[in-house]
Image (cartoon, helix red, strand yellow):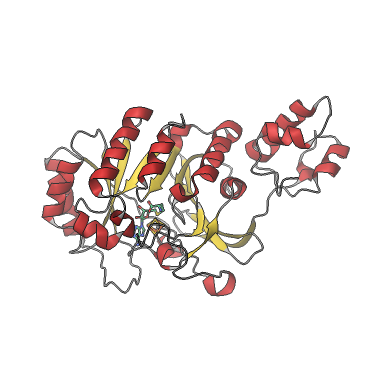
Amino acid sequence: MADTLCGLNREEIARLLGNRKDAEWRGKQIAHHIYGRAADSYDRMNDVPQDLRAMLSETPITNLQIAKHLKSSDGVEKLLMHTGDNQVFECVLLPYKDRVSCCLSSQIGCPMGCKFCATGLGGFDRNLTPGEIVGQYLALQRLTTRRISHVVFMGMGEPMLNLQNLIKAMRLLHDEVGLSYRHLTVSTVGLVPQIRELAQEGMPIHLALSLHSPLDSVRNRLMPVNHKWRVREVVDAMRDYARITGRKVTFEYLLIKEVNDTPEQAEALSKLVKGFPNVVNLIPFNYVDTEQGFRRPERARVQAFRRILEARRVNVTERQERGHDIAAACGQLAGEHKGKFARRNKGSALPLASS
Ligand code: SAH
Ligand code: SF4
């Protein structure tokens, strides 16, 4: 028996129903309740026969519980989730005028150890299951009458370290919830084999690379992953991803004052991304006390960096910052309630960071 129904597709739900003649149809109907209508209780499945509901009710729909619900003055909402095992993770609802998006976590904590990231500083607990990943989307969908059409995997964790569960979750979001693959964005620090593996999946999702410097010397200092795969290698993998999937890719660029926001790096960056019909997305550093003394650049420095890129015909956007008052920004999803719920293994398994 599955742990939870959320995480199974319609065929897998049908298999749970045994030899009934109508298993296939019922599987589809129940999947529609769970994913299409975000039902979190069997009582809401009025058109499913009682005996079937009674049988299914041995398996909970979801294991996610909401530990805290925070609402920002600008409409952003954040849920702090747990699964009853003292480990917390976060997801964020991002309503815009023309669409509603959400930011989901792929792991509890993160083992990648990036030096500017609150999640990374907290260590790593575990991968989230497909049901826990999609369950965040469904929990956020229950907060709004508008349909959440876009998903970004920019919450806690490195999605590519949990690739199989991520792929299953994205298939559920596409096949069962009905989202377009083109509206799903995965952000990665740049695990080259996984980027190449994802390119072969036939899912035209949007891939964003957290680049943060065109120079190995600087990127090494910021992101331990760069010791394993250098800038050139990871940019080549992104180029291949774009070619194979037919999708544009994005480069995320976190700006840290006097570390990676220099004119030299803007020049080098524009050369590096030459030929990509892409976008560089600038993200001014959200202050995290990293013991590195990192600071956020002033507006003028961000503008100067941007102007150099634009003069070299690079498309540039800046991340809209929202949800400040509830610490909902990407990279701040650290589980501030750690003391209360979470147990973190500081400095635990770092498969790549130290290599
Ligand atoms: N692990 C993945 C996805 C989660 S992090 C990745 O690193 O890409 C999502 C984004 O938030 C990344 O681009 C990351 O570099 C950025 N980020 C991390 N810490 C930040 C901070 N303190 N300020 C602003 N952005 C940050
Ligand atoms: Fe992990 Fe991304 Fe934070 Fe790096 S930036 S520690 S990969 S969540």
Residue drawn where x is 43% and y is 61% of the image: 350
Q: Quadrant of the N terminus?
A: top right
Name the quarter showing ligand 1: bottom left
**In the image, what residue occupies the spot 36% across and 28% down?**
244
Residue 67 locus on image (x, y percent): 61, 63
Q: Is residue 355 visible?
A: yes
- The answer to which image quadrant residue 87 occupies is bottom right
Q: Position of residue 167 (x, y in %)?
A: 52, 40
User: Residue 267, image x and y in percent?
Assistant: 12, 48
In the foreground, 63 or 150 = 63
Tell which of 281 and 18 is nearer to you: 18
Q: Is residue 147 visible?
A: no
The residue most toward the right is 51
323 to the left or right of 217 = right
Looking at the image, which residue is at 47% across and 54% down? Answer: 76
Of the 4 image quadrants, the one containing the C terminus is bottom left
Disc count in the image?
A: 0
Residue at left offset 38%, top offset 37%: 196
**Residue in the foreground of this view, choosing between 64 and 46:** 64
